[in-house]
Amino acid sequence: MGSFVRVSECVVVFIVLVMMRCEGMNHVVGGDQGWDAASDIASWSLNKIYTVGDNIWFTYSAAREGVLEVRSKDEFESCDVSNPIKMFSGGLDTVALDGVGSRYFVSGRPEDCHNGLKLHVQVLPVSSASDHLTNVMDVVADGPEPSGSAPLMMFMYSFLMFISLVVISFIEF
């Protein structure tokens, strides 16, 4: 009976993990520090993969800061805040990444933007992100290139996670 309960718990955890990925990821910009002049947004975003269906969350002091979405790479790089697409000022703002392409976010304070408080998000289709993740894993593992489609790789990854959970559930501590 105990083994059945453990296996059942593993199945539930597996289903929740798969459902979480299907619904998209939530990225809190800047991590624990949030959107703040003291944050190193460039380092935080370095290895992030954004896909259609993900959300990015900006957390900041509304009294001191704001977030602007700008149209172009030029506006982003020069911190030109004169003609934003959208302005966020609530202190806790969610942006749905609902399409493929580049999105540019900068601080509402040009001096903070010039000091690095800005974020470029390259939104990928879900299948491209899986391909990208597969390529990153290949580089890290220094192994041969994978064959097969991205959905097959996602299935295999999920299946291996499930098997790992089942094996761990049978180990007595």
Image: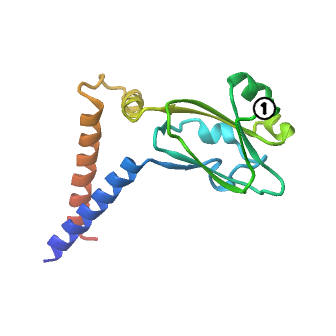
| Quarter of the view holding residue 75 | top right
Which residue bears the numbered disc 1?
83
Residue lying furthest bottom? 1
- In the image, farthest residue toward the left: 1
Is disc 1 surrounded by few (<14), some (14 to 19) or many (20+) residues within 10 Å? few
Q: Amino acid at mark 1?
A: Asn
Instruction: Please say whether residue 171 is visible from this viewpoint.
Output: no
User: Which SS class for mark 1?
Assistant: loop
Decide: is 154 above or below 142: below
Q: Looking at the rendering, in which quadrant would you find the C terminus? A: bottom left
**Within the image, what quadrant is residue 69 found in?**
top right
Residue at 77% over, 41% down: 107
- Residue ranking furthest to the right: 111
Q: Is residue 146 above or below residue 152?
A: above
Q: Quadrant of residue 104?
A: top right
> Viewed as shown, does residue 25 lie left or right of 160?
right
* Residue at the image position 68 percent from the left and 25 percent from the top: 72
Residue 51 spot, x, y in % from top left: 47, 38
Tell me if 75 is positioned left or right of 141 in this view. right
Name the colour scheme.
Answer: rainbow
Query: Can you say which quadrant of the picture contains the N terminus?
Result: bottom left
Q: Is residue 150 visible?
A: yes
| Observer-nearest of 68 and 38 | 68
